[in-house]
Image (cartoon, helix red, strand yellow):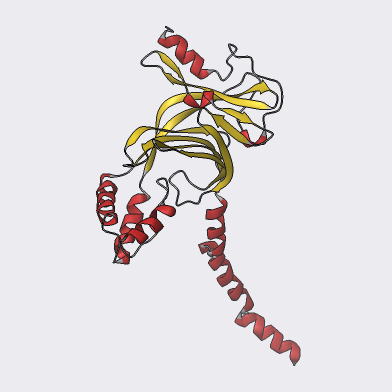
Amino acid sequence: MKSIISIIALAASPLLTATAFGADAVPPALMNFPGNGMRLTGESVSIAPTPEFVAMQKDVSAKLQKLPPEELVKFFKSYNPDSLIAYNSHIWPKREDYEKYKEEWKKTTINPIQKVQLGAYNRENNEWSLHGVSINAFAGRVSPLSISSLIYKADSNVWVSTNGELTPSSVETTSDNVYGARTGTIWTLKKEDSLSIIQESLSITRRTNGEFLYLTYNFSERTTGSGTMLAQGRYVLRFRVGPAAPDPESTATAKAQPTENSKADDSQKEVKKEESPRRQKRKGRRRK
């Protein structure tokens, strides 16, 4: 077993010489993940809502159970656990109650859990995988990430797991998402038989302000009849890949609203249009 000191040293360096990565260019779909023996250092993260929001969410769950079946189906079609729930008059008869819910949701924080490292590995034939480890310095342990077993086929832009192919679709979130406004790709799989329903997804997105790269992996297996959960796994990885810049979404809002300085400039222009009494008197003498 590696010592804690050696693990910390491993975490500090993005270069892992034990793995010889391919020299070819990393496919665009893998975005900023490096090849050539390099790994990005980041962290697994979790969201931490306020106690007040948790209480509000319990109330929402109770009201959902009372919704008519057709309304419940409509709700879950657009439901995303990482995003703010849109206003629904069945859940919030009073709009001001929803606004309180929204304000409390905005107080949710993103907390780091554990250091991770991730890089792309060229398997040849235009096939790639993401080799990653999570690093627990306190326990003196380095563990492989489960996504290391997935294979990316660049020619067809699909990921292959032991369950089958994960097919792509574009993803775009707004600031109403807990991880912010992002763009990228999500690959998904749904496999159903008489025994169970398997759902698997992997997404790679980047914040529109350029600061963070996110990788999210989800897996669940439920019984076909009762829907009992048999297995479930999820993690969100975050990597800082650039300096923070204003999100285009917030920048557009700021441009639409006049600033205090612009108001001051307008008032100064009005003052310049008015001439002083002395200047007016001089103009009168010239006319005579």
* Quadrant housing residue 29: top right
Question: With respect to residue 152, does 268 lie above or below?
Answer: below
Residue 31 versus residue 234: which sits nearer the camera?
Answer: 234
Q: Which residue is pictured at 65% across the width and 22% down the height?
A: 122
Q: In the drawing, does residue 83 fall left or right of residue 147?
A: left
Q: Identify the residue at image location x=58%, y=45%.
A: 169
Q: Position of residue 45 (x, y in %)?
A: 42, 33
The answer, for residue 85, to whether it is visible in the render is no
Could you tell me which quadrant the C terminus lies in?
A: bottom right
Q: How many marks?
A: 0
Residue 286 appears in view: yes
Q: Is residue 237 above or below residue 7?
A: below
**In the image as oriented, which residue stretches furthest toward the front?**
194
Give the side of residue 210 with respect to residue 59, left or right: right
256 to the left or right of 84? right
Observer-nearest of 69 and 24: 69
Q: Residue furthest bottom?
A: 288
Q: Quadrant of residue 3?
A: top left
Q: Residue at x 57, y 60 (%)?
A: 255
- The spot of residue 283 in percent (x, y) is 71, 85
User: In this picture, is 93 found above or below 194?
Assistant: below
Q: Pinpoint residue 186: horizontal percent, then vertical percent.
A: 54, 41
Vertical side of 226 occupied by 160: above or below: above
- Where does the N terminus fall, quadrant-wise? top left
Q: Horizontal and vertical percent for residue 25?
A: 71, 28
